[in-house]
Image: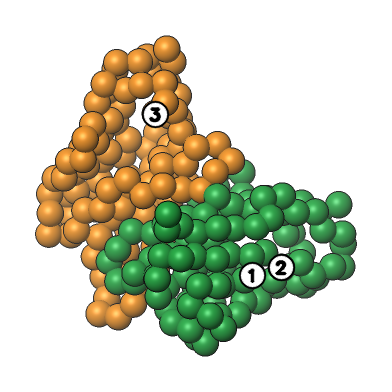
Amino acid sequence: SQQGEEDPQALSIQEGENATMNCSYKTSINNLQWYRQNSGRGLVHLILIRSNEREKHSGRLRVTLDTSKKSSSLLITASRAADTASYFCATGPLNSGYSTLTFGKGTMLLVSP
Amino acid sequence: DGGITQSPKYLFRKEGQNVTLSCEQNLNHDAMYWYRQDPGQGLRLIYYSQIVNDFQKGDIAEGYSVSREKKESFPLTVTSAQKNPTAFYLCASSMGGANGYTFGSGTRLTVV
């Protein structure tokens, strides 16, 4: 079953602009992660934010988490053509034992030169 | 360099055949996973393993089988019982718990 839902499904911007992607989920989580996938390749882990964190930064990436609204956003600042990829959010459920990640369907980002 | 390797990159299967996809990691990760990705879809979990000689079914395990005889290896067999096997298959590993996954580069399986 799909836990995270990304919005928008597709986003097209110019180089230098900021890109914002959103993720909504349904059940309580332990952590939320963002991944990037270039066409035909595996996913690359970008950033993990825990349920007790509200914001996290990594280079040009900024992730926010609002557990009351069950939503997260990924902001890529000063985008580059090389940022063109699909971006997925993944949630780790809240439980005491081992858990697996549940992925959304992704946002396709196109950054034009 | 540590990493996770999937092979082959492309695989063609005839109707009624079983095929095995390879996944090897040298990251010393305890946990390994297999996901299936269809066009326009997210990743769906097929099987996962937390430790050697143990594995669990994911959301779409029917028609698939796995083994975990070594920590480094987690092969996936797509059996003839899988009615729609054409897809992109991704293997991943992690330290377990609340940690990120490391993915392989995927195997694209096509039924001919």
Inter-mark Cα distance, 1 to 2: 6 Å
What is the crowding at mark 1: few (fewer than 14 residues within 10 Å), some, or many (at least 20)? many
Most extreme residue toward the front is: B1
A44 lies above or below A10: below
Secondary structure of residue under mark 1:
strand
Q: Secondary structure at mark 2?
A: strand
**Answer yes or no: do the residues labelled 2 and 3 have beta carbons within 8 Å?**
no
Identify the subunit bearing mark 1.
B
Residue furthest bottom in the image: B53
Q: Residue beneath label 1, please?
A: B76
Q: Which one is earlier in the sequence, the residue at label 1 or at label 2?
A: 2
**Residue B57 percent coordinates (x, y):** 54, 77
Rendered image: mark on residue A83: 3
Query: Can the viewer see residue B37 in this picture?
Result: no
Secondary element at tag 3:
helix
Image-quadrant location for residue A36: top left
Supply the letter of whichever chain is green: B
Position of B41 with respect to B79 (left or right) is left
The residue that mark 2 highlights is: B20
